[in-house]
Image: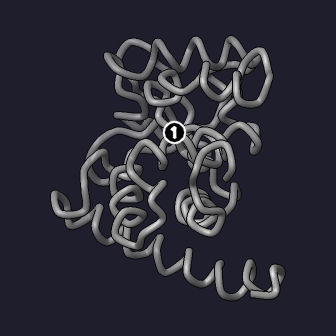
Amino acid sequence: SKKTGSRPAFLLAIFMQESGFGKNQGSCYLKNSGDGSGVSSRTGNTVSRVMKPDRDIEPFLGITASVGRDPFKTLVSCPQEVGWGGAMGAAQFIPSTWALYEKLISGALGVASSDPWRARDAFMAAGFLLKDNGARSGSYSAERNAACKYFSGSSCSKSSWAATYGSQVMKKAETIQTAMIDPIENA
């Protein structure tokens, strides 16, 4: 929180919303680096749109190589009803976004390479992205809008899906603050 400017309860709410605190880090594998298709880890069925080829495959291959992972045996998110999958780790960053923050994360943590599947790195990355999305002011509307941008790249007013996501995150953040953080801090 001190390094990124993102409030702890808000950051935890993002992780709860994105991956259930890391329990669900994806259920697809990239199998075709040409068209971005893959397979479901649960069924073995072919899944199209696992990763956007012109945006995310090259960064994904670089990220997995830098942390010693096999790109074709590393879980990523499956696509939802619209759009592409390919989100990585507990923070569910798409590879092209992770690549934008990779050096900042490594520098802040004092490590040679950042790893989206390592909780420490994922928390730092999410904190920086939320700060850049406007969450640093700490107001309800700023944090909600930052959550919407985290989810879709758009403000809450531009997408009803994003607005719903933002509201869900803020409810979780309030619960985390009042039921977990405040009691520990005797607030």
Does 6 appear above or below 86?
A: below
Does 111 appear above or below 116?
A: above
The residue depicted at 29 percent of the width and 54 percent of the height is: 81
> Which quarter of the picture shows residue 13?
bottom right
| Left or right: 151, with 161 as reference point | right
> Which quarter of the picture shows residue 75?
top right
Compare residues 15 and 28 and report the one nearer the observer: 15
| Disc 1: which residue | 93
The residue depicted at 34 percent of the width and 69 percent of the height is: 141
The coloring applied to the image is: one colour
What secondary structure is marked by label 1?
loop
Does 113 appear above or below 118?
A: above
Does 57 appear above or below 42?
A: above
Is residue 58 visible in this depiction of the protein? yes
Of the 4 image quadrants, the one containing the C terminus is bottom right
Compare residues 4 and 169 and report the one nearer the observer: 4
The residue depicted at 48 percent of the width and 81 percent of the height is: 171
- Horizontal and vertical percent position of residue 71: 62, 20
Is residue 26 visible in this depiction of the protein? no
